[in-house]
Image: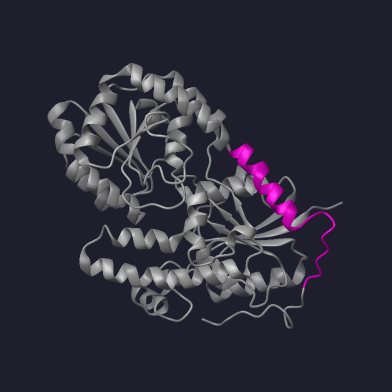
Amino acid sequence: MSKRRVLYLCGQAPWPRNGGALLRNYWMIDALRENYAVDLVVADEAEPIPPEFAALIDDYACFPRTDRERGGFARMLRAAMPGESSLTAGWTSCALRDYVAERLGRYPYAAIQVDLPMHAALPKRDAIPIVYNAHNCESALLARRAKKEPPHFAAALAIEALRVRGLERNLIGRAKLVTACAEQDVADFQRFVPGIRAKTAIVPNGVDVEHFRAIGDAEGDPCTVLITGSMDWRPNVLGLRWFLRNVLPGLTAALPNVVVRVAGRMSPALAAELDALANVEAVPNPRSMEPHLRAATVIVAPIVASSGTRLRILEAWASGRAVLTTTAGAFGLDCRSGTELLVRDEPIGFVAALVRLLESPNLRVALAARAAKRVQQYDWRVIGAELRAAYEALVPDTHVHVAPSVSEEVVFSVV
């Protein structure tokens, strides 16, 4: 008996695995392929598909984003149109939507899993169960960011948060299942979609625990602090600049030989800016975080506005590294300050905690040991089983779906 099929729509191809959304989609696909044939459609000018990922999917199609074809001004105009936003405009081309329509007319899909930027690729009518993969409560994240930005930018973000809230409300309303990262995200969604809990499964971000475990055997450089994350994502950049402005001067005054390594996706301009700073070292676009985790003594996650959960904290836990973060950085994680990590929000307290961690091997070992136990619940294999269970409740083996004809049922909006 052939496997049932899932049509998986995501904005970025989940390789290389150097970003939070990419990692989440990679491991969700890895989990689903045990029970389903997965057809992947992405809106991305991706690198060639790696052989190890090609083995996970049944079919793959890639379509460049329209905003890259037409330029930023066209994207701004599209973002202002009804039913769009700056987070979603320009992601789905006509060619992509036509391809999705053709697939839906050809195969009896059990479900369509979709990221928010791909919402325009969905059929107008919900003949096939929709699974909304909520990486964050994006409107809540925008609202939190607005409180951290300059006034002129904050006003624009607050307006954008309302536009995105409308998109999220519509997509959640259509979805049969919402896979949220954390209970805190569900609470954010519930403020404008009161009935969301009835259709939500908590599918947290996770980590390949076994893969990172060996890093814990290596002793990091006692003077190296590591900041990881996608530095092309605005919330991460806000946190990084907060750290450089408010924490770094006090840290270097206390420990002149400290090195702060910043590793993640970043522009050449940001890398040059970081390298120009004393005691700071940029590692742009690393293929792997492992050597940098191995070299570090303490992992710092200076997040000032958040939603979802921080994958990089989970990688640090699995690698046996002590973590210092903020309340926003610990958002969504099952943890307590002083148990699995340290949480500080004020610059003076953050500096003091970081110096203490660098100078206290016993504290680092104690935090890392407790974090190693906690991270077991975030192993992707555990999470994958939870995702498959949520899918089976949505589309059990007895589910029979007759694919609608494209002419009658699958109607796409023209943008």
Q: Please report the bounds of the magenta region as a residue range.
A: 380-403
Specify whether 284 is left or right of 39: left
The colour scheme applied to this rendered structure is one colour
| Residue 58 visible from this viewpoint | no
Compared to residue 218, the image places residue 415 above or below, namely below
Residue shown at the point (18%, 25%) measured from the top left: 257
Residue at the right extreme, as displayed: 1
Residue shown at the point (56%, 51%) measured from the top left: 25
Compared to residue 412, the image places residue 68 above or below, namely above
Q: Based on the displayed image, in which of its 4 quarters is residue 299 positioned?
A: top left
Q: Based on the displayed image, in which of its 4 quarters is residue 293 positioned?
A: top left
Residue shown at the point (54%, 61%) measured from the top left: 115
Residue shown at the point (39%, 58%) measured from the top left: 141
Percent position of residue 318, x then y: 48, 30
Specify whether 329 is left or right of 30: left
Percent position of residue 190, x then y: 51, 61
